[in-house]
Image (cartoon, rainbow, N blue to C red):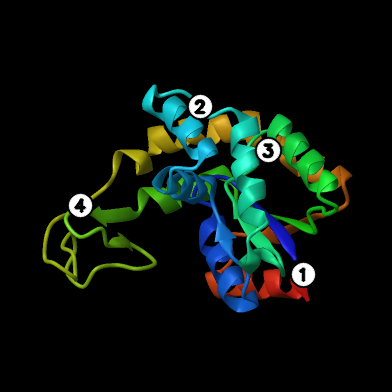
Amino acid sequence: MRIIMLGAPGAGKGTQAKRISAEYGIPHMSTGDIFRANIKAGTELGMKAKSYIDQGALVPDEITIGMLMNRIHEADCANGYVLDGFPRTIPQAESLTKALKEDGTAVDYAINVDVPDENIIRRMGGRRACLNCGATYHIVYNAPKVEGICDTCGKELVLRADDKPETVQKRLSVYHDQTQPLIDYYGAAGVLKEVDGTQDMEKVFADIRGILQ
């Protein structure tokens, strides 16, 4: 089962990807994790990626795809994987399709967790983080016992710059411009499945399980 997760930032696709991974015993992979593993291991592609990252430049797609294909060939991916946050653009999707085809495989499901922008802005605006221990909360869905104070370490909780409405709006604009066309791309490939991400997390996962079964 080779799965790609699609959805706007804050739609909850990462949470669902982790649940799919646990439920079906397939690895949850993000390009960030793959970059870090390759850099730590000092692989040739990892060192190439690091040279771009150190300059603050984007890692070229061919290096990313190379590392990704190496990861896919590892034993724990024998039954599939969940890709989270990649591809982000049509050229990346086309490169991935080509690399998988050469490998004799293809994406089985592209699952789009669909949430309207206004819901995402409201959802992310309610997030609170503890900069001391890394714990995260939500003022509506997962509130701390004492308002503004971390349950774990007692330090003050903050609204991160990434979660401020103006920042979220900018990220959504980039998403609609670059990433949303992937919905049409995978729709045309016949592998797109959509779930309503405004529902309770358990219901979203139940819907995904229904698709995968």
- As measured in the structure, the alpha-carbon distance from the residue carrying label 2 to the one carrying label 4 is 27 Å
Crowd class of label 2 (few under 14; some 14 to 19; many from 20; radius 10 Å)? few
139 vs 153, nearest the viewer: 153
For the residue marked with disc 1, what is the amino acid? Ile
Where disc 2 sits, the SS reads: loop
- As measured in the structure, the alpha-carbon distance from the residue carrying label 1 to the one carrying label 4 is 38 Å
Q: Residue drawn at (51%, 49%), measured in percent from left and top?
A: 34
- As measured in the structure, the alpha-carbon distance from the residue carrying label 1 to the one carrying label 3 is 21 Å
The label on residue 58 is 2
Q: Position of residue 59 (x, y in %)?
A: 53, 29
Q: Earlier in the sequence, mark 3 or mark 2?
A: 2
**Location of mark 3 (residue):** 180
Q: Which of marks 1 and 4 is nearer the N terminus?
A: 4
Q: Which of marks 1 and 3 is nearer the N terminus?
A: 3
The label on residue 131 is 4
Q: Are marks 1 and 4 in contact (CB under 8 Å)?
A: no
Q: Quadrant of residue 147?
A: bottom left
State the residue lying farthest toward the left: 154
Is residue 154 visible to the viewer in this orientation of the structure? yes
**Location of mark 1 (residue):** 211
88 vs 55, nearest the viewer: 55
Is residue 114 visible to the viewer in this orientation of the structure? no
Q: Which of marks 2 and 4 is nearer the N terminus?
A: 2
Q: Where is residue 128 in the image (x, y as percent from the top left)?
A: 28, 55
Q: Where is residue 168 in the image (x, y as percent from the top left)?
A: 44, 38
For the residue marked with disc 3, what is the amino acid? Gln
Task: Say whether residue 179 is left or right of residue 155.
Answer: right
